[in-house]
Image (tube, helix red, strand yellow):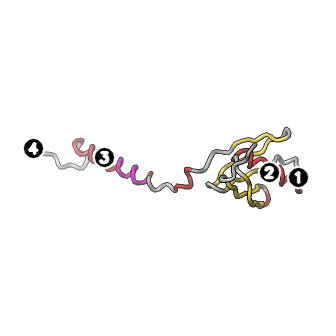
Amino acid sequence: MKSEHPRDPRRRPAAGLALACLAVLLSACVAPSSQLESPPQTVLLDGDAYRVEQITAGTWSAQAPRHLPDGPQKTASLVRAIEKASNCKVTDGSYGAQGAAFNAQVDCASRLKN
């Protein structure tokens, strides 16, 4: 006699296959930009540690140590930290996140020589 109960162990492989297919479909929905992101890294410049991370293919973000005063020297150091981490030239940048992070656009076609 054939069992038609929904919890019939003979029906579980089909459910497992359906879940596996769903997982594959959902993984295909991951945005391509998320594959470009990198985990934050620490860049040392002049004895100070800068937190730098890639946001998209052409956008990087950096944070300076808290003890550094705001001003042109801090901005120049953030640019250097991004260029060192990305090995690309910073072409534009501005402060975001209420001034806590410096976000920059980079040009990787013009790779840095040093």
Closer to us: mark 4 or mark 2?
2
Mark 1, Cα crowd under 10 Å, few <14 / some 14-19 / many 20+, is few
Q: Which mark is residue 78?
A: 2
Q: Which residue is the site of mark 4?
A: 1
Amino acid type at image mark 3: Leu
Sequence-wise first label, 3 or 2? 3
| Magenta segment main secondary structure | helix
Sequence-wise first label, 3 or 4? 4
Amino acid type at image mark 1: Gln
Q: Position of residue 84 (x, y in %)?
A: 74, 45
Q: Which mark is residue 17?
A: 3
Amino acid type at image mark 2: Leu
- Describe the element under mark 4 as helix, strand or loop: loop
Q: Which mark is residue 73?
A: 1
The answer to which of 26 and 102 lies nearer the viewer is: 102
Sequence-wise first label, 4 or 2? 4
Mark 3 vs mark 4, CA separation in Å? 25 Å
Sequence-wise first label, 2 or 1? 1
Mark 3 vs mark 1, CA separation in Å? 58 Å
- Describe the element under mark 3 as helix, strand or loop: helix
Name the outermost residue toward the left.
1
Q: Residue, x 21% and y 49% (percent of image)?
A: 5
Q: Is residue 45 above or below residue 61?
A: above
Q: Are marks 1 and 4 in contact (CB under 8 Å)?
A: no
Q: Residue, x 70% and y 58% (percent of image)?
A: 105
Mark 4 vs mark 2, CA separation in Å? 74 Å
**Which region of the structure is painted magenta?**
19-26
